[in-house]
Image (cartoon, coloured by chain):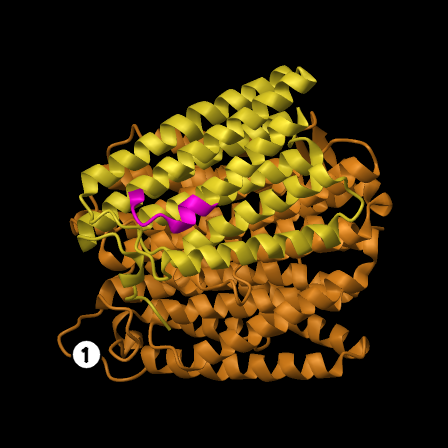
Amino acid sequence: MTLYIGILYSGIILMALLMVTSKRLGALIRSFAAQSFLLFLVTILFAIKESSAEMYTVAFLLLSIKVMAVPYLLSKMVRRIKTDATTGPIVNPTLSLFIAMLLIYLSYLFAARLFPLYDRVQESSIVIALAVTLIGLFIMVFRMKAIAQIVGLLVMENGLFLIASAVSGGMPFFVEIAIFFDIFVCVIILGMFVYKINKVFTHIDVDKLQELKG
Amino acid sequence: MEILFILGITAALAFTALFVNNARTLGAINAFGHVVTAFFALKMAYAFALVGGSLRIGNIFYIDALSMFFILTISILNVASSLYSIEYIKGEFTEGILSLKKVKTYYALFNIFSLSMFLVVILNNMGMVWVAIEMTTLASAFLVGFHNNKLSIEAAWKYIIICSVGIVLALFGTIFFYHAVSSCVGIRTLDWTEMVSAASRLSPHIVKTAFLFILVGYGTKAGIVPMHTWLPDAHSQALSPISALLSGVLLKTAIYAILRFAVITNRCVGEGYTHSLFLFFGILSLGVAAGFILVQKDLKRLLAYSSVEHIGIICFGLGIGTPMALYGAMLHVFNHAVTKSVMFFGAGNIVRRYGTNNMNVIRGVSGIMPFTAAVLIIGAFALVGSPPFSIFVSEIMILISAFTKGQYLAAAAFLLFIAAAFGGIIFHLGKVIYGKRPEGMEVTKEPVSTKAAFVFLLTFVIFMGFKIPFVINKLLLLTVDIIKGV
């Protein structure tokens, strides 16, 4: 059991690194879907272990929203907008990968300080969860396509989901459901704004949105 | 039970908006609904002021004096904003800026936005509070980007993205609190009531880190410097009645969430920790905002930065943390809400009439819109904290507490920045209000409902400079007890 979870966790962080290095929006979205799928497998494993119906529900919500619906909507957006399909990087992939490594090390330091009493498995899961969140933030800040920023936000939320299940076995059921619903609505609304930006500005490079300042 | 009416009426108004096809009728129905809501809120607040205590409905809602104070503030601002909306939206509709469909969307979103703010302050489960706060962002994002032009869409995009990242950090903090409760006490809950009663047994280590995340996360939504960057954009681009709500109550609901966690943190690690954080961010916000106020050219951005300044004052008061300072800070929440709404409504009228936000172009408002100009002069002096208006009372309370507590350096910084903001706002608005009126602009007739909104708010601004009404006074005293954990 621990072994499987360990493998899945490694997969999750690997997907995060893939996202950091991907140059094209399509690849970014596919890696995100894969990461969410691994997250779904982790949740299913926990659900089997604790045989709780609530965990199964959460897992299937994860599958339907983050693995299927959201990536589908995002790829549709990429096709319809006919952008040049790069992620709009302002830091090149090699340097990004290096920074991502640094973020993983930072999360390790943070987790070791904050939760000193944990066993190795739990500690590494906290480290990975934190690192995924930070990498999500990195994608949001250093990728200038609006769609890439949405993916960054979703990656941050994947990380949060992991932290919640790693440190305290998941949030209360209703809160978890409400958060899923919220994320879904958030992505839809962000998507609507991406279309609006594209219509008004004829591009979706958010670094060129700089008329408001001071 | 009144609370269910308040929620019910607001939700019903959101639905009504979809079925009424006349802009003015819809506005009037909306305003009437909010007057009724405010009446219920007042009735409820009166009951609280008489007996105190708290009200629980199931395990979902928990309402104590702190929640009640915010419910009252939100409902009063809703009345003002919905009154002002009637002619504002009608005007844009007649000019063809908004289609009928957009007018209906406006009123529907207005009420969803209000509903989500009410939910923030009454939910017991801190996870659900998080969801409600995210809901406020999502509902108001469309109201910020309502005109679908380059500026408003840019503002709306920044608003959602920055606030969503902030709020993710807040969820992080919430999860840490949840972890602290479940690992130290063994109950798996996010209910505030239970978290507070377990607070003294939590691990201080985790609680301190968790509170930092909460402060930065919800602080983004509250517009605390340096997480305030979305605020001037969103406030300047939103429709003016919405700017008033954003500035007046939305920022404060985030402060409310921080306060709830601060109460837990105080019980766990003592008051010193949260006080020094509040004080630091308060002074930082004051200083940065004062700088931007001095060099501002855009009328609505000026008011937005003034909101950052006032959030700084509130944080400063929370950071001093004596009962009198807390009373002052909470009173300031209310005073700033009503005064800033007056200013945004006034600015809204000006911007509509002149067609620009640029303060170098707008001149001679007193000659064109005498009523608005008069209101703005009173509002400006009230806003910068000159006596005999209400903000003066709350600011002086905070200042006296800072001195009596011996925080001379902080108090000196506070005075300096307030003085700078005073100079900046009066200088800029003086030029706008007086000055030579542009040629070819006629005196404009101002509609009754707009005047009613002004008078309604100014009553609070002026009256509360002399006497704090019984209900509010009692609620504030109870609120201070809650924050102090007595």
The quarter holding residue A6 reads: top right
Question: Is A174 on the left-hand or right-hand side of B248?
Answer: right
The quarter holding residue A124 reads: top right
Would you place residue B386 above or below residue B198 in this image? Answer: below
Q: Is residue B452 visible?
A: no
Q: Where in the figure is residue B428, as x and y percent of width and height?
A: 38, 80
Q: Where in the figure is residue B159, as x and y percent of width and height?
A: 41, 54
Q: Where in the figure is residue B460, as x and y percent of width and height?
A: 55, 60
Q: Chain of mark 1?
A: B
Q: Is residue B227 magenta?
A: no
Q: Is residue B147 visible?
A: yes
Q: Circle 1 sits on which residue?
A: B438
Secondary structure type for disc 1: loop
Q: Where in the figure is residue B357, as x and y percent of width and height?
A: 29, 69
Q: Residues within 10 Å of mark 1 (few under 14, many from 20)?
A: some
Chain B drawing hue: orange
Residue stretch rendered in magenta on the structure: A17-25
The three-letter amino acid code for the residue at tag 1 is Pro
Chain A drawing hue: yellow
Camera-side residue of A109 and B419: A109
Q: Residue at x 23, y 68 (%)?
A: B354
Camera-side residue of B142 and A71: A71
